[in-house]
Amino acid sequence: MTALTENGPLGLYYEEFDVGQMLVTRGRTVTEADIVQFGTLTGDFNPMHMDAEYCKTSFMGKRVAHGMLGISYAIGQLYQLGVLDGTILAFRELEAKFSVPIFIGDTITIKATVKEKKDAARLGGGMVKFDLRIINQEGKTITKAGITLLMASKPTDEA
């Protein structure tokens, strides 16, 4: 269901994003339950995520969250800002580099900067490409990603 106000969707339209604009989310602490539920949902039971004893002998030393769990949380945290609510049409592209593990108990924050925009009128809006950073409580960048979202254009009666 689209969140609506008396003036329309809560989210920003394609035309309302500006190159260089930065969005910053609140923090979210990753729990053991998050990792177990994500593994169960995806079927990814790799011991680096699920087996504490195995991890004691691995180079990480302890269990780590799935990289895609971090990406999933990043998208969810962006959505919670309200800027995509009712105006996102599609998630179009993802490119990611995982540099630092997310451990149980880490708190992650997302910084997303609008890198570029490209009109896609035939699709009903335009592409907004974000430079996304997942950052832990120590200020370390865990994941660098580029995401491209198809955002709706402002209705002509509002343009």
Image (cartoon, rainbow, N blue to C red):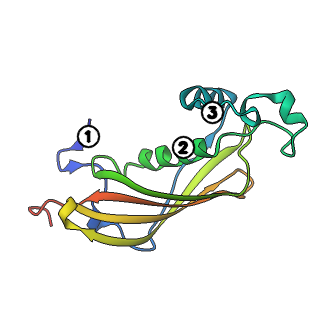
Residue 18 picture quarter: bottom left
Q: Amino acid at mark 1?
A: Thr
Q: Is residue 111 left or right of residue 118?
A: right
Q: Which mark is residue 2?
A: 1
**Does the residue at mark 2 contact the one at mark 3 (Cβ under 8 Å)?**
no
In the picture provided, is 88 more to the left or to the right than 107? Answer: left
Q: CA distance from mark 3 to mark 1?
A: 32 Å
Q: Position of residue 23 (x, y in %)?
A: 48, 60
Residue ranking furthest to the right: 57
Residue at label 2?
73
Q: Is residue 108 above or below residue 133?
A: above
Task: State whether residue 15 is above or below residue 7.
Answer: below
- The mark total stands at 3
Location of residue 100 with respect to 18 vertically, above or below: above
Q: Given the image, on which type of amino acid does mark 2 rest?
A: Tyr
Residue 153 visible in the picture = no
Label 3 crowd (10 A; few <14 / some 14-19 / many >=20): some
